[in-house]
Image: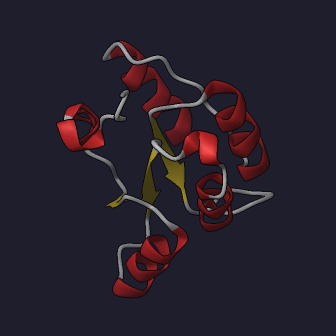
Amino acid sequence: MSALTLSWAMELYGYEVRTCYDGRSAVQVAHEFHPEVVLLDIGMPVMDGYEVCRELRNDASLCGTRIVAQSGWGDPEARRRTAEAGFDLHLTKPLDLGVVKALIDHPAMKRDRN
């Protein structure tokens, strides 16, 4: 439900959205869609968010993609693991949709299009 709610909110903000419910699908969709930002849950089935992030980071065509962890785990160990996996940011659930929008809109989160 949280993935669906987040995708609806992002669509209402005007973003083009793809929603996946497991890690393997997230990798496949990212390869096809080439998103600017990926909001990635850590605790997904099939492949967890750490595995997905590492796989996306190994794809040169996604080098400009910003990957944001969203997790119920906000402890130092979880944050260390997300940094090691290659995430750009780590947000702890429940997410504040206004904060998510502000982060996505922030110039540092925009893909360099040159």
Q: In the rendering, at what x and y percent does residue 28 appear?
A: 76, 38
Q: Is residue 57 left or right of residue 69?
A: right
Q: In the rendering, at what x and y percent does residue 29 appear?
A: 70, 33
- At horizontal 36% and vertical 81% (from top left) the residue drawn is 75
**Which residue is most to the front?**
114
Please tell me whether residue 74 is drawn above or below residue 35 in the rendered image. Answer: below
The foreground one among 23 and 111 is 111
- At horizontal 52% and vertical 47% (from top left) the residue drawn is 63
Q: Is residue 62 left or right of residue 68?
A: right
- At horizontal 63% and vertical 64% (from top left) the residue drawn is 54
Q: In the rendering, at what x and y percent does residue 74 appear?
A: 35, 73
Quadrant of residue 76 in the image? bottom left
Quadrant of residue 80 in the image? bottom left
Q: In the rendering, at what x and y percent does residue 72 appear?
A: 43, 65
Asked if residue 1 shows in the view, the reply is no
Quadrant of residue 26 in the image? top right
The C terminus sits in image quarter: top left
The coloring applied to the image is secondary structure
- At horizontal 49% and vertical 42% (from top left) the residue drawn is 38
The N terminus sits in image quarter: top right
Q: Is residue 12 left or right of residue 45?
A: left
The foreground one among 80 and 19 is 80
Asked if residue 109 shows in the view, the reply is yes
- Across the whole image, how many numbered discs are drawn on residues? 0
**Which residue is most to the bottom?**
77
The foreground one among 60 and 97 is 60
Please tell me whether residue 22 is drawn above or below residue 113 in the rendered image. Answer: below
